[in-house]
Amino acid sequence: MFSPSFTGTTIILLLLICYWLKISAVKLRRKITHTFFIHKTFGKYFSKTIHKQIINREKLVPLRLINMSINNIIRYEAEHKRAYTRTTDGIPP
């Protein structure tokens, strides 16, 4: 099975690596299965919620803000609020 140049330690290391790869594959398969389960179970709920928000014209966060950090989102909200107050007070933004 193995070449005679392999020592006992090398064989043990190879077996450990194979065992680690098998465990990693099982973990990855479970994670993928769990993700699909969550999507299948709650996917309709999330899409209905977003659909209701669009129908009721509630404020949705723009997609470009999702990639921003939390600090940038807070800064954006503060600037938006400041600009809104200026326009209601009659001060140009």
Image: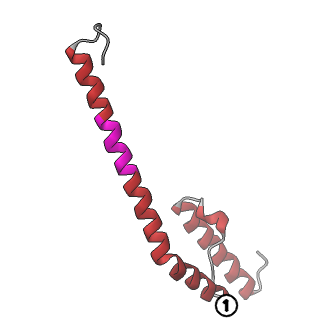
- Going by the numbered disc 1, the residue's amino acid type is Ile
* Residue identified by numbered label 1: 55
Per the image, is 25 magenta?
Answer: yes
Instruction: Please count the marks in the image.
Output: 1
Of 70 and 83, nearer the camera is 70
Image height check: is 73 above or below 17?
below
Q: Position of residue 50 (x, y in %)?
A: 60, 81
Dividing the picture into quadrants, the one containing residue 9 is top left
Per the image, is 69 magenta?
Answer: no
The residue at 42%/61% (across/down) is: 33
Q: Is residue 55 left or right of residue 90?
A: left
Q: Give the prevailing secondary structure in the magenta stretch.
A: helix
Q: Position of residue 3 (x, y in %)?
A: 32, 11
Which quadrant would the C terminus be assigned to in this image?
bottom right
The residue at 30%/19% (across/down) is: 1
The residue at 31%/30% (across/down) is: 17
Image height check: is 83 above or below 14?
below
Dividing the picture into quadrants, the one containing residue 7 is top left
The residue at 72%/87% (across/down) is: 89
Q: Position of residue 38 (x, y in %)?
A: 44, 70
Farthest bottom residue in view: 56
Farthest top residue in view: 5
Decide: few, some or many residues near mark 1? Use Cα within 10 Å; few <14, some 14-19, many ≥20. few
Of 77 and 90, nearer the camera is 77
Q: Is residue 59 left or right of residue 35?
A: right
Of 90 and 35, nearer the camera is 35
- Residue stretch rendered in magenta on the structure: 19-28
Q: Position of residue 83 (x, y in %)?
A: 70, 76
Image height check: is 13 above or below 41?
above
Farthest right residue in view: 92
Label 1, secondary structure: give it: helix
